[in-house]
Amino acid sequence: MTSPWSNWAGNHTATPARVAHPASASELGECLRAAASEGLAVKAVGSGHSFTPAALTDGVRVELDRMASLVRVDGNLVTVQAGMKLSSLNATLAANGLAMPNLGDIDAQTISGALSTGTHGTGAGYGCLSTFIEALTLVTADGAELSCSATQNPDLFAAARVNIGALGVLSTVTLRCVPAFTLRADERPASLNDVWSGLDEHVGTNEHFEFYWFPYTDRVQMKRNNTVPAADAPLPGWRRWLDDDFLSNTVFGAACRLGRAIPATVPTVSRVSARALSARTYTASSHEVFCTPRRVRFVEMEYGLPRAALREAFDGLRKIVDGLPYKIQFPVEVRFTAADDIWLSHGYGRDNAYVAIHQYVGAPYEEYFRRFEEVTTPLGGRPHWGKMNFRTADSLAQAYPRFADFTALRDKLDPNRVFANVYTERVLGA
């Protein structure tokens, strides 16, 4: 008997027929061949930080916890097994004097899960994390190990770097890293007018820029991160604990519970929170600035948009929030990335602005998310593959120029749909 598996947010659960813990690519291949011969579907799971049913299966759940080691370091090229978590990757790179060029704000995901869903950070000069892949190895349903890079199996490389688990199971990934670097973080409250009036400058003159909008207010928290030569202004331990642990998790969690129980308090809490924020500037290792702890659980939708469409989408979002029959407890996050050439990347062929909306677990969200999707879709919106969406393959085929190429490669690599589940059938088609 196997126990149910649940994702981090708790909004998806499944009980598989069995669970496999392969320790090598060859063991993984044997597992996949056996499942295929029995007619069982297979899904690899990471740490469950996707809000979609991407990892659900009633067949074979593959956990890569025994495939989470460093393989080799060759200059700035670092090869790791696909089950390694980002937090471990960051520590491993730091021990070797290296770092990822950019990161998102959570480091609990496995590297394979983060890459396969198009996880990204912010910065006008940086694509999603998958753009840092130099090469990878994919194990397919027949147990074959396929290696690819820009020069070896280039079409597979263009597809597999963001693959939603639909082509096979990642075994190893070679990442193109950079020498370890220090960031100067500048975080300060501002008004929406401050953001809009200087948006091009904010995005263009900072290596990494993002902002958080507090619903029911005109207030935001702006974050600018830029490389500096030395960590000469570290954040005191007590301030990091106060801001990132106590206020952002303990106090915010209590506020969310209050808002879920008494919705009428939410706008007031949001206004007080926005006004209570204070500026802070500090220096630290890049991964310590990029990543912060997230213990307050939520569900999330995120859409990548052409940058020119950001203001229209954001104004539409504000109208949605004001007109909902319930209250929104989480700030809205806005980030920016560069164009890339990965077939199912949200940034394929264009610079993106991302708008991420959240709701506290247990609070209503569906109308909020659906109405926002209705605003973003005609603007060219592309949903983050690891975050909630209601799109179908017919709709998504219009949003991704290489969608048909991806699904044709899927037909070739997995004709019997060993790696299919309810999510891939909806977003990629049967």
Image (cartoon, grey):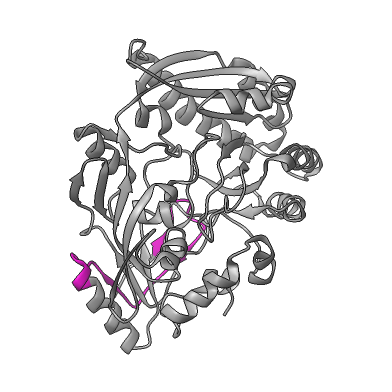
Given residues 361 and 386, the one toward you in this image is 386
- Residue 382, above or below 193: below
- The image quarter in which residue 60 lies: bottom left
Q: Which residues are magenta?
A: 5-27
Determine whether, in the image, residue 72 is placed left or right of residue 342: left
Compared across the picture, whether 18 is left or right of 96 comes to right
- Give how far across and how far down residue 13 sits, in percent: 45, 64
Placement of the N terminus among the 4 image quadrants: bottom left
Rendering coords of residue 46 (x, y %): 36, 57
Residue 78 screen position, x and y as percent: 25, 46
In the image, taking residue 12 as reference, residue 222 lies left or right, namely right
Residue 9, magenta (yes or no): yes
Q: Residue 77's spot in the image, x, y percent?
A: 26, 45
- Pick whichever, 60 or 314, lies toward us: 314
Magenta segment: does it hold 118?
Answer: no
Which quadrant holds the C terminus?
bottom right
